[in-house]
Image (spheres, helix red, strand yellow):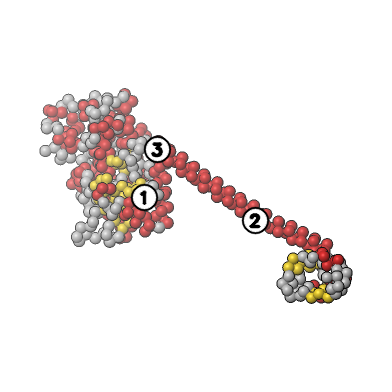
Amino acid sequence: MQSLERLNLSHNILSGLIPATFDGMRGLSYIDVSYNHLQGPIPNSKAFQDAHSFEGNEGLCGNVAGLESWNRHVSKEKNKRKLVFAIVFPILGAVLLAVLAIVFIKTRRKYSSKKKKKTRRKKKPETEKSDIHDEIFSISIFDGKKLYWEIIRAINGFDSIFCIGKGGSGSVYKATLPSGSIVAVKKLHQKLDGEETSQKEFHNEISALINIRHRNIVKFCNFCSNSQHSFLVYEYLEKGSLASILSKEDEAKELDWSRRVRIVKGVAHALSYLHHDCVPPIVHRDISSSNILLDYDYEPCVSDFGTAKLLNPDSSNWSCLAELAYTRKVTEKCDVYSFGVLALEVIMGKRLGDLISSISSPSNCENKLLKDVLDQRLSPPTPEVEDELTTIARVAIACRHSQPQSRGKQCTWFLSRYHFKLQLPLEDQTSRLNNSLGFKLHLTLFELARKSDLLV
């Protein structure tokens, strides 16, 4: 190779560095390595002095006229690396921070979810209601059709095994959604032949239900309506209806006097809200123990309101029917009347009709005291509770006055003393009832039975 004088390696797709062994080839006077992919410094021998021999090799550098010097090339490469670092590292840092943030958020949500589940197993009625309500609303807003089919599948097309109650306006089913949330689904009865309900009116009623927010009113979540059926979706309350609990010996004993007082107050709060805080006011029309649901802590929630407006004025509540017999007009005083019936049922542990049917004449109830008609399944109330029970009995009797105009609006006196808006109506009536468990309730009961046409 020492005798080699000229060497042409152009257009050979060569790559890499030019070997340093060319420096030892003393006989080599010319070399052409143009149009390859060579890079790095060129040797300092005389064969590498023609710049044209290195054309087409962008990576070559050296001390030859027309080529970039090696020092400048090295400096340029360093600047490129610095630029790459300046761009890449901030991007990598941002990506890393984003990943860490996502991991942190997911971990926190998972921990929070586990914590909520643990708390629910113990006690958390108010928060649990809110969580369920929010979840259902988010699902319905996201895809109402999806929620519809989830409910249909959850109760197997309204299979009777999922039915937990039946009423005058519809049947209630317990549905467990894929998310794990449990809701109550009330399927409205099919319309009768010839009965027409305005779709606009239906939607107006639903809008009114959606806007209701009160701790003692069952939360309305959604509704579905098509040619086959219409149903309403509510939060699910664990303890079921007040009527069911009062009808069972063991469960009724769990409903002690303090809880019963709280139930009466809670229902009064709800009715006051419907009558005075809603715009326009809402008349429930069907207040009864069957429509009072209890949560895990026996907190009462009024249910099944508003639906009567969508149907015929038929009702499962005999007390409301008695009101219609008097006035042929439904007002908030119908709810006040029904509240009186409910309050007496709560403290007596039985429907008022059952109690009145056991009284055959005034002589049989001449010495009937309030303490004698209280629910005998419970221990006698404490002195602190006695006063509240007596007041509830007084107000309940006043609410059941046969003349609607004689019933107080739900405000003033009871609000100032017991924090819920019920007013005692007639002073001459209430003055006869002293504030103790010893007053004779039989006169009021018999008079109430006669005026309500309940005593045959």
Q: Residue type at mark 3?
A: Arg
Identify whether 142 is placed above or below 61.
Answer: above
Provide residue 262's location: percent of width, then percent of height: 33, 34
Q: CA distance from mark 3 to mark 2?
A: 45 Å
Residue identified by numbered label 2: 91
User: Residue 386: x percent and y percent?
Assistant: 30, 26
Marker count (numbered): 3
Pinpoint residue 95: horizontal percent, then vertical percent: 61, 54
264 in relation to 17, above or below: above
Q: Amino acid at mark 2?
A: Ile
| Residue 329 visible to an observer of this rendering | no
Query: Which label's residue is closer to the chain start, 1 or 3?
Result: 3
Circle 3 is placed at which residue position? 121
**Residue at 67% from the left image edge and 54% from the top image edge:** 89
Amino acid type of disc 1? Answer: Leu
Q: Is residue 403 left or right of residue 40?
A: left
Q: Is residue 255 left or right of residue 123?
A: left
Q: Where on the picture, by quarter, is residue 258?
A: top left
Residue 311 coordinates in the image, percent (x, y): 25, 54
Q: The residue tagged with tag 3: helix, strand or loop?
A: helix
User: Which quadrant would the C terminus be assigned to in this image?
Assistant: top left
How many residues crowd around disc 2 within 10 Å: few (fewer than 14), some, or many (20 or more)?
A: few
The circle on residue 92 is none
In the foreground, 396 or 105: 105
Q: Which residue does the numbered mark 1 point to in the structure image? A: 177
- 292 vs 85, nearest the viewer: 85
Left or right, 207 with respect to 243, comes to right
Label 1 element class? loop
Residue 241 picture quarter: top left
